[in-house]
Image (cartoon, rainbow, N blue to C red):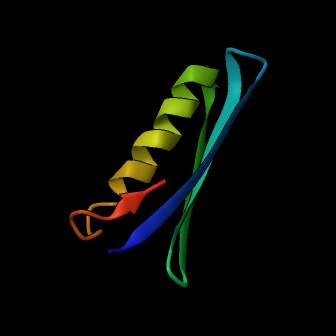
Amino acid sequence: MSQVTLWIASVCQPDPGYGGYGFVRIEGETRVGQAGGDRRTTGVKMALTGLVRALESLAETPAGALVT
């Protein structure tokens, strides 16, 4: 069984204001990440955007993989 670890971070300062997100996906020896942001956003939007992008990166992960 394959195991995948997702690390997600987000920030917005001030809230609302400038914000960003990032994630790292670790699958075996492979590490993939992405980051982005927006000038006019909220902390909640950045947190959810980071989560959605991280979950989208799982598209090619085998079914039944353990995701933490």
Question: Is 22 rendered above or below residue 43?
Answer: below
Left or right: where 19 falls relative to 49: right
Height in image: 65 above or below 17? below
Side (left or right) of 1 relative to 30: left
Image quarter in which the N terminus is found? bottom left
Relative to 18, 27 lies left or right: left
Q: Is residue 42 visible?
A: yes
* Residue farthest toward the left in the current orientation of the protein: 63
Q: Residue furthest front?
A: 1
Give the farthest residue toward the right. Answer: 14
Q: Residue at the far bottom: name it.
A: 29
- Residue at 43% across / 69% down in the picture? 3
Which residue is at 27% across, 61% downward?
59
Q: Residue at coordinates 67% horizontally, 14% vertically from top-left?
A: 16
Nearer to the camera, 67 or 45:
67
**Is 54 above or below relative to 10?**
below
Residue 41 visible to the viewer? no
Name the foreground residue: 23 vs 68. 68
Which sits in the foreground, 56 or 3?
Answer: 3
x, y percent for residue 41: 59, 23
- Position of residue 48 relative to residue 44, above or below, is below
In this view, the residue in front, 53 or 28, is 28
Residue visible at 38% across and 50% down? 55
* Number of numbered markers: 0
Q: Horizontal and vertical percent for residue 66?
A: 38, 61
Provide residue 30's location: percent of width, then percent of height. Answer: 52, 81
